[in-house]
Image (cartoon, coloured by chain):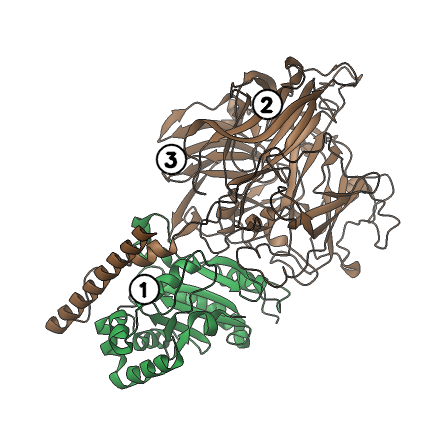
Amino acid sequence: MNTAEQTDRHDESIDAASHQSRRRFLKLTGTAMIAAPAILTSRRSRAQALIELPPSPPTTPWLDELPSTIEPLSQTNLFSGPLPPPQGEANTANGECGRTDHQRWSEFFGAPVIQPDQADLYELKANAHNDHVFHPHYPPQLAWSFEGRSSNGTVLYNPTIFARYGQPVIVRLHNNLPPSHGAGGTQLTSFGLPEISMHLHNLHTPSESDGFPGDYFSETKYGPTLKKEGKFKDHFYPNVYAGLDEFGGIGDQREGLGTLWYHDHTLDSTAPNAQRGLAGFYLLYDDLDSGDEHDSNPNALRLPSHPYDYPLKFQDLRFDANGIHIFDQLNPEGTLGDKIAVNGKIQPVLRVARRKYRLRLLNAGSSRFYEFYLVNGANVVQQFTYIANDGNLLPSPITNMTRVRLGVAERADIIVDFSRYPMGTQLYFTNRLQQTDTRGPKKVQAPGTRILKIIVDHEPTEVDISQIPNILRPVRRPTSDEIAAAPVRNWTFARKSGLWTINDRLFNVKSARATISKGSAEIWNLSNPSGGWSHPIHIHFEEGIILNKFVDGIAAPIPVHERGRKDVYVLGPNTRLRVFIRFRDFTGKYIMHCHNTIHEDHAMMVRWDIKE
Amino acid sequence: MNNENTNSRREILAGMGLATLGMLGLSAAWQKLGGATAVTSNYDARDTSFPNVTLYTHEGEAVRFYDDLIRDKVVAINMMYSDCAGICPVATANLLRVQQMLGDRVGRDVFMYSITLQPELDTPKGLKHYADRHGIKTGWKFLTGAPEDIELVRYRLGFYDRDENIDNIKENHTGMIRIGNDTLNRWSMAPALAEPQQIMATINHLDPKAVHTHENLA
């Protein structure tokens, strides 16, 4: 403290001296200008203003437990409620926001209004609740959640949705968020805008149900790409594979998606809104990845299934001295969380049976990258099998993996065989990737920070018959002819006057920077010429395949787990990725953006459209 | 800081002629004339409130940054300097279109401010010339002040870069419009060169009186 004061005084005296000398200079010369006017020199203010937020208060680890099984969202009968059942056109007369008509609706349902048993119908309510406990040492406090109901009527926050290819889903989302956070807040505690646009990352979704950033709504307000405010919005998730037009039926099974997540995507406010808690899982199954380890279908993979199929959502959060969740809305680089919540809990415990589990790991942001290791109490690294990246099953499993690196929004499905451990074994998910600001990760350093404790707690109630086949889901790689014929589009991400640009242009929510014909394929060059920043770039709607990776202009190997289909492409410093993407089956507005949601909210985003 | 000081400063400003002050550098001038320290409020960055420093409008009025400009208001704030040859003129023209679209709401529901990054040279009078030259209507204030005060405001509003070399270049702070609603403690931003309609949308998103964010319906 003394040193700081002395430094301050010292700087003041320098400033005062420089003012005096400037005044003498001006008097002597009568000059109105001094040289180099465009340089700022106020050291004192900088030192004073750039004080970082203090670290979150300490927390004792392993006090709270995650539920041993997840409870999925239960369906709602939308034929008996106060509102009419879902329909193709926006039901603005009954309070639906002014979205565009659902595409291909009559093809799926044959009538303007849906009939019973044509789709799985769900209801979610975006709501605020004041009783969320991140950690027992922090007070119960405000969180926002997508609320639903379990089969026995219990309220679930951000529930997992189980969906199935060939069975369309309609999610009716009500926006019940309060218009304000109430009195007594500050800019650090009052983050989050009550208008929402729910994106299902990365379903093959028609654009009006995609959660386009400009499609945000509330009862009193509507975004620039909607036509009317509203209390609710129906989202139509067809659950067809990409390739519907090309292959017929329900599309190309090689395009199957597995681990998806829904989250708010409101223009300018995705980071604060997602920080508030608006994010959950959507797990999609088919007859290959059927979600049933007992499946008698010979094609079924019989991977470990519910309740041994367990999603884990990691979020970096920051808390003030009172243990209240904060986010600095005025810091141009947002707030890096120093506490990692797993499914909303800080340093929780998960008790598992002595058998195989499929763990689905999601980095739900805002801006921290992770490199997870599973270690025992002596920090010895344990092995597992890596089966899916970005929710997409790989052509074959990667055995003996020891780490999972995740940029924001990336996912990894791994299978851990806990039967290899004696009862009572304690294991830890540990993050070894160091990061001190929101610009990107630094180096990997053992032993890292323990995030989640796993206790091998009980014997399974039956013999574990799940398996990890050597072949998972085949990938459709583009042929050399397709690559040669594909138009090339370059996208360069840069920083200019404190703002993000893509190809030197700013985001325009109303206007597409690229218009692509439905059914075509392109090669996109994604370039990050910056040395200091990492950008997890997310392309909505379609999965792509990385053809080449260049770092500092030199070809670099593509990691084995990134050789399947992806929807998040981590552009490290001075990196270029060459990606092959098809654009199929639906038309309308979509986006590509940095999924560091702080960059995203600073307009690091580009709209592209698909047309007929 | 009390009113007496502010008043005496204003009188002195009026009496001396603003250009002279500009030549001396405002900070030194305030110190000399007001007998006060340059930083006109005690401020700690860990405190999340805004510094309530005294700034001066292009119309020669002394205002407190928080009490008079921010408190209970919806605001759109950018930073510029009058001899900026980069994007400032375009940004100003862009904001002028926003002002035109906002119409009567400017100065009533939405307050527009442009704060100079070069207070040593941008006197109130100079900023008035700048505003006149660009056809700025009433309700949009151009602001200068003691350099240390301007710096506090700049950091607090988030017009900075953590990299000191980038932070030292003024033009790097001209690309953003900080948009906020003090009543609700909600803060957002828009690029200064974004389409004026998109800037409007962000303002309207934070203004409870607006329903459609893309048109001026309030």
Which residue is the site of mark 2? Answer: A427
Q: Is residue A129 above or below residue A525?
A: below
Q: Nearer the viewer, residue A580 or A228?
A: A228
Q: On the rendered structure, is A507 left or right of B85?
A: right
Image quadrant in which the C terminus of chain A is located:
top right
Q: On the rendered structure, is B139 left or right of A551?
A: right
**Residue A62 image position (x, y, % from top left):** 61, 33
**Residue A294 image position (x, y, % from top left):** 79, 18
Whether residue A605 is visible to the viewer of this picture, yes or no, is: no
The Cα–Cα distance between marks 1 and 2, rounded to whole angstroms, is 53 Å
Amino acid on which the number 1 mark rests in the picture: Glu
Q: Nearer the viewer, mark 1 or mark 2?
A: 2
**Residue A548 image position (x, y, % from top left):** 45, 27
Amino acid on which the number 3 mark rests in the picture: Asn
Which residue is the site of mark 1? Answer: B148
Colour seen for chain B: green
Q: Earlier in the sequence, mark 3 or mark 2?
A: 2
Numbered disc 2: what chain? A
Q: Nearer the viewer, residue A69 or A414?
A: A69
